[in-house]
Image (tube, rainbow, N blue to C red):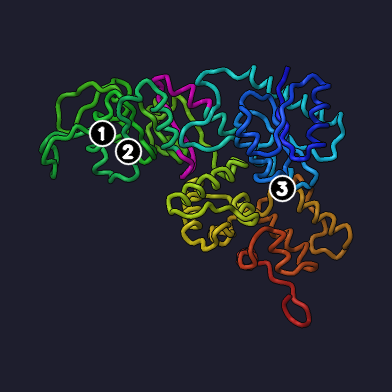
């Protein structure tokens, strides 16, 4: 028999809901507020929590965080889309409006508890599950797949190639692999191949004997030897010179390293994790990267998704970073305004998580408000904001406009599924609507600033329409 906790401040509704659920063979407990629910009840023993959205003291959505893995069903008499979206974004498992139909409530409860039971049966208490990794934030499907693969490959001795754009967290993945491997008690040595001059990279990696070259005043064992027994992380391995690539290949194949100027090799036991944002296959074809080394390091490849492809993870990351920087700078906890959330979720983030981190830190430093972060403090390059999350919507708007006007400069509208670039998309939308919209309205509809709209007009050669009195 499933246990349900009902959190509702109105006694009549709470009692009626309890009786309804008890008639359907559920065991029901009650609370009148979030505080009462968290102080008087062990939330982990319940299979479902049903909470009103508006409660005295803290809102019902606070139950979502307090409940942990227990699903929370939010009910409210304010049946607005905004309330539903906010509740679901915070992690509510479902949403139901009051006054609700009894059958509707029972159906929702059965569905939620059934899903939770199925998930519990399928979940295996092993490291191959998709639970999150310390230091990495995100619960989107692509991130869960990444977590799962990290858990699978970490305990093995396999060489790993981590591929992803700049700022996606490649070193975090390497640290996670090392920490979950049998080598976690040994050192992990990280080397950025792009940060070391080409003339010094071999000496840094493989070591050298005293007097091996000008300036070699003392013997050096090298970073590979320093990582003996542990993990060597080579970031931006695509920048490694060909001579160093040949030496690295021998380390991987023979398990031995020979310092520069030495006639003797010595054994080393290192696990290599390499990372790059470049296309190593293409570099191989251009003879800039050894093909034999590529196949040697590409045993298991982990691809990190760019931030723009991680959906609601962007908001979770932003809020986590915001809280961290507020604590570091001893400021009151700040929140993101709706305009800030819109800007964050529509921006393409070419610098990925690193750029988001910088934006949050800058916003906290410059914020003079005690409660909210306004979107202008993020200093996002609006020229890189996505015009729309859905091309179909605007293309359909173009079609509707053309259906009511035969004087359109474009006689044939593209089909909604036509594969247009964003620039083509922008140009068509402006041409179709500039007769009926002001510059401000065009910019707002496209999700860009007036300045950005003007700059794109200049770049694409789209003049502003003029009337007899001048420009609009």
Between residue 4 and residue 130, name the one nearer to us: 4
Q: Position of residue 31 (x, y in %)?
A: 70, 34
Q: CA distance from mark 2 to mark 3?
A: 41 Å
**Residue underneath mark 2:** 191
**Residue underneath mark 1:** 223
Q: CA distance from mark 1 to mark 3?
A: 49 Å
**Residue underneath mark 3:** 390
Residues at marks 1 and 3 touching, judged by CB atoms closer than 8 Å = no
Residues at marks 2 and 1 touching, judged by CB atoms closer than 8 Å = yes
Between residue 191 and residue 50, name the one nearer to us: 50
Query: How many numbered discs?
Result: 3
Classify mark 3: helix, strand or loop.
Answer: loop
Give the left or right position of residue 238, taking residue 38 as reference: left
In this picture, which residue range is highlighted in magenta? 148-169
The 10 Å Cα crowd at callout 3, few under 14, some 14 to 19, many 20 or more, is: few
Asked if residue 158 is among those painted magenta in the image, a careful observer would answer yes
Q: What residue do we see at 79% from left, 68% from top? A: 435
Q: What residue do we see at 73% from left, 75% from top? A: 472
Q: Which picture quadrant has residue 246?
A: top left
The 10 Å Cα crowd at callout 1, few under 14, some 14 to 19, many 20 or more, is: some
Q: Position of residue 136 (x, y in %)?
A: 49, 36
Let me know if residue 283 appears in the view. no
The 10 Å Cα crowd at callout 2, few under 14, some 14 to 19, many 20 or more, is: many
Q: Position of residue 415 (x, y in %)?
A: 79, 48
Q: Position of residue 182 (x, y in %)?
A: 37, 20
Q: CA distance from mark 2 to mark 1?
A: 8 Å
Which sits earlier in the primary sequence, circle 2 or circle 3? 2
Classify mark 2: helix, strand or loop.
Answer: strand
Tell me, for residue 250, which label it has, or none. none
Asked if residue 176 is among those painted magenta in the image, a careful observer would answer no
Give the left or right position of residue 306, taking residue 221 as reference: right
């Amino acid at each position: 028999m499933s246990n349900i906790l009902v959190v509702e401040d109105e006694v009549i509704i709470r009692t009626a809901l309890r009786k309804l659920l008890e008639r359907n063979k559920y065991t029901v407990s009650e609370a009148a507020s979030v505080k009462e629910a968290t102080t008087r009840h062990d939330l982990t023993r319940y299979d479902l929590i049903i909470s009103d959205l508006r409660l005295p003291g803290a809102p019902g959505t606070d139950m979502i965080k307090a409940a942990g893995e227990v699903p929370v069903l939010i009910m409210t008499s304010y049946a607005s889309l905004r309330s539903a979206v906010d509740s679901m974004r915070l992690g509510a498992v479902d949403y139901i409006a009051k006054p609700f139909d009894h059958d509707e409530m029972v159906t929702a409860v059965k569905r939620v508890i059934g899903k939770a039971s199925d998930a519990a049966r399928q979940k295996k208490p092993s490291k191959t599950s998709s639970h999150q990794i310390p230091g990495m934030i995100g619960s989107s499907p692509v991130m869960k797949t990444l977590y799962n693969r990290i858990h699978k490959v970490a305990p093995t001795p396999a060489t790993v190639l981590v591929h992803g754009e700049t700022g996606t967290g490649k070193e975090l993945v390497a640290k996670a692999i090392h920490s979950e491997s049998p080598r976690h008690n040994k050192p992990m040595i990280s080397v950025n191949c792009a940060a070391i001059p080409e003339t010094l990279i071999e000496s840094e990696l493989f070591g050298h004997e005293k007097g091996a070259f000008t300036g070699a005043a003392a013997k050096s064992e090298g970073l590979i030897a320093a990582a003996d027994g542990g993990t060597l992380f080579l970031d931006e391995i695509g920048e490694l010179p060909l001579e160093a690539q040949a030496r690295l290949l021998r380390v991987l194949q023979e398990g031995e390293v020979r310092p520069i100027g030495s006639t003797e090799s010595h054994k080393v036991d290192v696990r290599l994790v390499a990372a790059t944002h470049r296309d190593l296959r293409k570099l191989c074809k251009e003879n800039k990267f050894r093909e034999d080394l590529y196949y040697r390091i590409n045993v298991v490849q982990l691809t990190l998704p760019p931030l723009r492809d991680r959906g609601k993870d962007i908001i979770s990351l932003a809020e986590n970073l915001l809280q961290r920087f507020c604590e570091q700078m001893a400021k009151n906890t700040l929140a993101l305004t709706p305009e800030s959330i819109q800007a964050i979720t529509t921006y393409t983030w070419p610098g990925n998580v690193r750029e988001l981190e910088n934006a949050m830190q800058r916003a906290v430093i410059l914020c003079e408000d005690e409660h909210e972060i306004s979107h202008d403090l993020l200093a996002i390059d609006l020229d890189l904001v996505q015009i729309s999350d859905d091309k179909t919507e605007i293309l359909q708007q173009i079609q509707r406009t053309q259906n009511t006007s035969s004087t359109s400069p474009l006689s044939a509208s593209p089909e909604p599924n036509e594969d247009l670039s964003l620039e083509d998309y922008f140009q068509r939308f402006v041409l179709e609507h500039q007769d009926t919209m002001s510059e401000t309205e065009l910019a707002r509809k496209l999700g860009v600033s007036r300045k950005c709209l003007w700059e794109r007009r200049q770049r694409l050669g789209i003049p502003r329409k003029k009337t007899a009195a001048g420009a609009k």
